[in-house]
Amino acid sequence: EPTDDYELVVAEENRSAKQDNIPTLPSLFFFSPNNRFRRWCKQLVGSSSGNEAERKSIFNWFIMACVLASIFIVVLDEPAARKLQQYIISPSAYDAIDYTLTAIFVLEIILRIIADGFVMVPDSYLRDPWNQLDFCVVILTVATVFGGASQVPRTLRTVRSFRILRLIRYFPGVRHIFADLIHGFPLMVDALILTMLVLVPFCIYAVNIFGGRFFLCNDNSVGGLSECTAEFLNPIGDDGNSPSILIPRVWANPYGYDFDTFPSALLHLFDLTSTEGWILTLFSAMSTPTEADVQPVFDWTASTVYHSLYFVVFMVVAHGTVQLFVGVILENFKQRNGISTLTIPQRQYLDLRRQLSQVKPTRKPVRPKNPIRSFCYDLVINKQGLFHKIMVAIVMLNIVVICTEYEDEPVILSQVQDYLYVAFIFCYLCEVFIKLIGLGWRKWIQNKWNRYDCVIVVCTMTMCILRFTLENLWTQRLEQYLLVLVSMRLGQGFSSLQTLFHAVQASLPSILNVSAIFMMVMCLFAMLFMEFFGLTKFGPYGNDHANFRSYGNSLLTLVRMTTGENWDFLMHDFTVSSPNCVSASSADFLDSDCGSSAWAYLLFIVFYIICTHIFLNLFTVVIISNFQYAYEHTARFTLITKTDLQKFKKAWAEVDPKGTGYISKTKIAALFRHLHGRFDLRIYADGFSLQELHALAKKEFDDIGDEKASSLYTSPELMQLRYRYDEVNARLSLLDLKSTERRRKQYNLLYTELLWTQTPKGISFDSALLVMAYRFIDPQEFLTLDRLLDRLEMLEKIERNYAVEKVRGYFLTLAERKRYLRKLWEKANEQEIRRLSVLHPNDSNFPNERHA
C-alpha cells in the first residue's frame, strides 16, 4: 500500500495508464462509441473528464438552475405551513413542479449514462465521485416524490434536503475544498475517536462520584429525600411583601443533565468540551452531598469543593484534545496543496510568486506643464512625502474623534464633533481633487485606493448634506460610520499593513470557497432541522427567535449554535416527549408537537462537530496558510526586494507609458536598457558603454593641444576626427572578456525567452517579470518536480536555439567579412588605378572591363 506522496503519485499514474489502454466499450451494451445519438449526448452534457467542457455546456447550466429551483421548492415546503395550510404555492402546483424537476434529473442521468457508459471503464458515469453523489440524491428524490406523501416516512422526506449538495460539482473552488474535507475525513474520525477515548475515564469517574447526587428538593428548607414530602409555601415575588402559595415538594434533578448513567455522562462531558455551561456544572458538583438522598448545599469549607479539580483537569485535557481537529484539518490541507512536503527554498519560490502577483503595471507619470497641475503633481507623486504624512495624521485624528463619542454626551461635544466631521470630509474631498488634478483622470483611476477614497468621500458628503437638510431622515449621523471606513487607508502608509492587506487579498478566493460550502452545509442542516423540529413545542430555551418553525429562523438559530451559545441546552429542549407534549403516529406527524431524543442528539452533535469543529477551524486553516508566508521569515524570498520591483515597474512604464501591460517584441531591448538595480541587464560594465567611451575620447582630446594631438595620429584624416583612439583602446584593454561574454549570453537567453512568451497582444508584464525573476533562483533547488521539468525543458530549448543562432551568426559574420574584404580590395585597386592614371576615374565601364 502506498505510504508517501511519491508512491501515491506513481500509483495514480499507473492507474491512469491502465485506463488509457482500455478500449471504449459500448454504452449500456448498445450505443457504440461512434453512435450518432451517443456522440450527441456527449456533446450535450460535456465530457465527464473535462471540467472546462462541463462549464461551457449550456445543458449543465440549465441543470444547475433546475437544482436551485428544486432547493427553493423544498425551502417553501415548511411543516408549519403544511400544518396551517398556509401554502405559498398550491399543493397541486407544488407536486407538478416537483414531478417535472425530478423527471429532468432522471433524464439528465440517462443522457450522461448513454454518453459515458454506466459502470464499464474507462470514463463511465459511476466512476466519477460527483456522479455517484448525484445518482444517490436523485434515486432518493424519486423515492420521495413518486412514493406519495402519505406512504413516505418523515425520515425519508428529509433526503430532499441533500439536493443542495449537487451544486458543489458546478464550482471548481468549492469542489476542491469539499474534496479536501472528504480526503481528510478518516483522520477527523480518528481525532473524534481519540476525543471519545479521552472522555471515557472521566465518564467512569463521574458516574461513580456524581451518580444520583444531582437530585434535590425544590424546598431548600428540607434536609433530604425523606423530608421532601407534602407541600410548602413558596413566595411569588422576590420581595418580602409578596404573597406565597402552596406547591408540592418534588425530589428531582432540575439541571437537565446528570451523571447517573454512562451514556448521559458521556453526552454531558461532550457538551462541556464546547466550554458551554461548564461553570454551572462545576458549582453543581461542588454542592453535591457526601451521601445519597441528602439535600445539596454549597459550602466553601466542605470537602466537595475539591470536585472542582476534576472539572479543571477535564477542561484542560478535553480542550487540548478537541484542538486535534485544527491540527488534522491543517495538516490535511497542507498535504492536499503540497505545502507540507515543500522545502524552504520551494516555499521561498511560492513567496516570490506571491510577491510578483501583487505587482501590476501603471501608467508612466508625466509632470504636467500647467503650473497648478504641476504643483498638485509634486504634492501627491511622492507617497512618502509631506502631503501623504499630513493626510495620514488627519485620518488618525479622525479615528480619535470618533472614539470620543459616548452615550448622553454633552451638546457642546456633539457640536464640536459635527464640525470636525465636516472639516475631515472637506480635507478628504480636497485630497481627491488634488490627486485628480495632479495625476490626471487615467492615472488617477488606475489606483484602487483612489477609487476607494472617492466612493467613501462622495457617500460621506451626501449623508452629511442630508443630515443637515433633513433632520428627521433615517440616515442621521450615518456619515460617522462611513468615516470609520477611512481608517482602512492607513494601509497605504505602513508597509506592515500593506503586507496584511495583500495577505487578505491572496486568501480571499479560498475564504469565499470555504464560505460557499459552509453556507451549503448550513442550508442543508436548516432544511433537516426544519423538517424534524418545525412543529416541536418551545422549551425553556426556545422562543420566537430560537426555533425551527421557518427556514429563516432555522438559519439564524444554526448560526447562533455555531458560536456554541447554549446549543446544548437548546438540544435538550427538542428531546421533549410524551406526556409533556402531544404525540401522534408517524403518518400524522403534523398533529404532534413532540421532539425526538435520538434525532435531536444525532443532528445537534453532528451539526456542532461539522460546523464548529471542522468548518470554523477550516477558516482558520485557510487564513493561516495564506498569512503564513507574510510572517514566516524562513519562507521569505529576500533576493528581490520591493524596491527592485518598483524599479522594474518604472522601467516597464518607460516602454509602456499607457500601462496596458503589454509591449511589442521591438521594445524588449529598450526595456533591458531601462532596468537598474538587481534586474540590471547591461552587457558592459560601468565605464565601457558606447556613450561613456565616446565621452572619454572627446574629453581627452579637448584637454590636449593640437600639436600634441597631431603626434598621436598617423594621418591628417584621423586627426580631423578629433577622437582619442589611444584612450579608448587603453580603456578597452581593462575589459573583463569572460564576464562580458557571460552577460552577453544571459542577455541573449533572456531576450529569446521573452520572445517566446509573446501572445497576440504582445509580451505581458507578468511574463516579463517572471522571466526576470528566474535569474535569481536555482531551478533544481527552488522548483517542485512538475515545474522543474517544465523549466528545464524550456532552458534546454533556449540553449539549443542560442547555439543555433550563434553558429548562424558565425557564418553570417564570415560572409560579411568576406564581402567587406572584397569591397576593400576593389576600393584599393580603384585607387591604385587612379594613381597610375590608366583610366579616367569617372569611367563607368571600368568594373565590367576589369572583370572581363
Image (tube, rainbow, N blue to C red):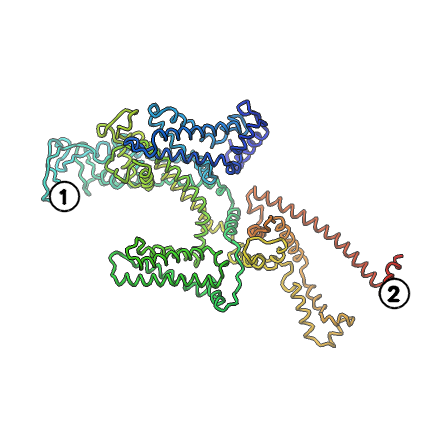
Which residue carries the number 1 mark? 238
Closer to the chain start, of discs 2 and 1, is 1
Q: Quadrant of the C terminus?
A: bottom right
Q: Secondary structure at mark 2?
A: helix
Residue 851: x and y, percent? 88, 57
Which residue carries the number 2 mark? 833
Is residue 383 toward the left or the right of residue 10 in the image? left
Q: Residue at x 46, y 29 (%)?
A: 132
Q: Amino acid at mark 1?
A: Asp
Q: Amino acid at mark 2?
A: Ile
Q: Is disc 2 surrounded by few (<14), some (14 to 19) or many (20+) residues within 10 Å?
A: some
Q: Secondary structure at mark 1?
A: loop
Q: Residue at x 87, y 65 (%)?
A: 833
Q: In front: 597, or 51?
A: 51
Residue 719: x and y, percent? 75, 72
Residue 476: x and y, percent? 30, 55
Q: Is disc 1 surrounded by few (<14), some (14 to 19) or many (20+) residues within 10 Å?
A: few
Q: In front: 417, or 359?
A: 417
